[in-house]
Amino acid sequence: MKKLLSILCAAVLLATLVITCVSCGGSSVSADFKVGAILIGDENEGYTYAHINGIRTAAKELGMSDDQIIWKYTVPEDEKCYDAAIDLVEQGCSVIFSNSYGHQSHMKQAAQECPDVTFVAMTGDQAATSGLSNYKNAFTGVYQSRYVAGVVAGMKLAELVADGKLTDANYDGDNIKLGYVGAYPYAEVVSGFTAYYLGVKSVVENVTMQVTYTNSWFDIIAEGTVAEALAADGCVIISQHADSTGAPAAVQALQDKGQVIYCVGYNVDMLSVAPNAALTSPTNTWAVYYKYAIETAANGGTIDTNWAKGYEADAVGITALGSACAAGTQEKVDEVVKGLKDGSIKVFDTSKFTVGGATLTEYLADVDGDFAPDTNAIWDGYFHESEMRSAPYFDIRIDGIVENNNN
Amino acid sequence: MSHLPQTHKKEPLVRIVKRDAVSAKKAWGIRIIGLLCALVVCAVLIFALTKLNPISVYTSMFRGAFGTARRSWQTIRDAMMLLCVSLGLAPAFMMRFWNIGAEGQILVGGVATAGCMIYLGDKMPTPLLFVVMFAASILAGALWGFVPAFFKAKFGTNETLFTLMMNYIAIQLTSYFVALWEKPFGSNTVGIINDRTNAGWFRPLFGQQYGWNVVIVLLITIGMYFYLRHSKQGYEIQVVGESENTARYAGINVRRVIMRTMIISGSICGLSGFIAVAGAGHTISVSTAGGRGFTAIIVAWLSKFNPFVMIIFSFLLAFLDKGAAEIASKFNLNDHVSSILKGIILFFVLGSEFFITYKLIFRKSEKEIAAKEEK
């Protein structure tokens, strides 16, 4: 009870901290300034819901009324995105956001045609090379919160080992098995699961992780099935980079049957579907960016072509810790977050991982968005993720992580 | 020996009787009444569900479709696409060949066009590239139309099922090519093709981005009108549609007419795939056809296969689409509300065709009968 109370207190404190920080600095957006939002889903889909919340929160903090935001829900990643963008221009929007990766080339076409309107393709990667001054990309440093979520998982793993709860099936040689449900073999996903894995590894050294792709951002059945397959192979903690609750629900069901298994979600709190199995979920606090972008555009400023911020701007975080978390997790999380903020901890510290048994000293990543390696991203002993462009470009397959079905 | 009670056989309350010929004026009157009824029902529904003023909802529907030059052009672009597919379907349906495979014919035409843009975009002078794209889309569509026609003509297979199945093949084929051409790897989308060079994109005509779409489709409209109404082949299509036996007695080679007509039908649908990819979306996905292959059936039937009337119905449907999207975002309604409105309007428009073909005769009240008998 005391622990729960302290966690609750900490969460409330953290929340107020975020809110006060976000609301600092008075601002004004004129009443005729309009914002357009092109969304891949609607409120019923976690990823989009987080964006809707972000925009709503930002608008509220900027004192905007509801009719200053025009929504386009369930816009697919095809020419309908272009139509939606043009329509928003016609409705008088000055800045238009799209929230899915595949929207970007259609947004770019609209940006070409409407130079007076700013278009932001969230999670996109072509703004810098597009040569357009009104076309922007943004992302959060969510790899940082995945690292922190990995630390939470690592604490649990250490506790399970100490309590002697693991069996031989949970080991591959000397290493404890972890599972990961990935959406696509993108850099975005690779960057995420590597950060998470390194987070776990920072607490428990002897771990190995399997990644299985579903080839969909949102497939509740496939995600559940993949989670079950990973569990059957002995994975102790299963995390995900996919948007549904399929995996946590499957893990909870297995735990109810007596298996020692836990999960780490994504984007939304998974405690509602996995009350005893969910540890936490890494999240994006999109409101931070939306507030910055809307405020900047409304006051005639120029939005960063590539915006990517993590804990340093409180743009990422993790959801409330589940009751299954190990004792002392919150303290550890606070310590790691502090380290990330002051730069003493680097997620992709090259001394912490190897590729083919060797430590990397340089790596050419695709930063300009043409899908061919072009720029060295390793110097000063770490991989500089999201510093040269907002979308993740860490796509190194490191030792200890096995992809089951990347074809 | 039966002692059945002597019941007076009651006349049913309503009888449905086929009308004799209806004058065009009366037919259009019925259609307009149907549309007005639809607007009234929608108004009641809008008010009941959202408490919004129906008039302002209708006004913004109109604004959404024709409010600005750019919106008007988008509506025109969509209407032209739909019209093109309807024109493709017209000869097939006139022949009573149930071509519900337009969706697939559009897709293969689109895939062929996208393939040319991707592989040949920087290897050919523009005019030649357009000729190749044009030809490729027509060939692909023609093939998709010919296959079911061939089996129908040779083995009497059911064309409804066959053309429907061809849709699924086309969708899978499109998925395959999307995965092959996807950009970036793993994204499952092709994105805008040739977004840096614009190779294979329709150039603006008279300063209008969609100028070529209009010109091409209107040319096909005029051509189809004369083909169906004033050519020997058009007449053969009509006779085969009325009765295959009559056609046979008249010495028409029914098999050849079926295959020839479906090649034409498929070609035009394939061509609309060309317009959709090169002239509008500049991308290819399984939603490139976007259900137009089915919506066009409504357009073709409502217009009684008259190409010029098809223009009206294509615009009506494109207008409903754009208007519905507008009210969804303007009044922050769920997308589905506007789909409901669209459905109600279509229901009444289709319903008015029923009242044009049939009339209802109500049972006369006993007083009326008595009054008649007294005379």
Image (tube, rainbow, N blue to C red):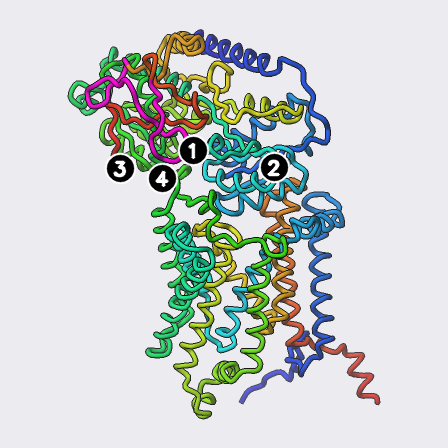
Mark 3 or mark 1, which is nearer the start of the sequence?
1
Stretch of the chain drawn in magenta = A351-378
Residue at image mark 3: A405
- Kindly state the secondary structure of the residue where label 4 is placed: loop
Are discs 1 and 2 both within one chain? yes
Report how far apart the C-alphas of labels 1 and 2 lie in the structure: 34 Å
Residue A22 x, y percent position in the rendering: 58, 16
- Kindly state the secondary structure of the residue where label 1 is placed: loop
Three-letter amino acid code of the residue under disc 4: Gly
Report how far apart the C-alphas of labels 1 and 4 lie in the structure: 17 Å
Residue at image mark 1: A243
Q: Chain of mark 1?
A: A
Q: Is residue B165 left or right of residue B202?
A: left
Residue at image mark 4: B186
Pointer 3 local density, CA inside 10 Å: few below 14, some 14–19, many at least 20:
few
Which is more foreground, mark 1 or mark 3?
3
- Kindly state the secondary structure of the residue where label 2 is placed: loop
Q: Chain of mark 3?
A: A
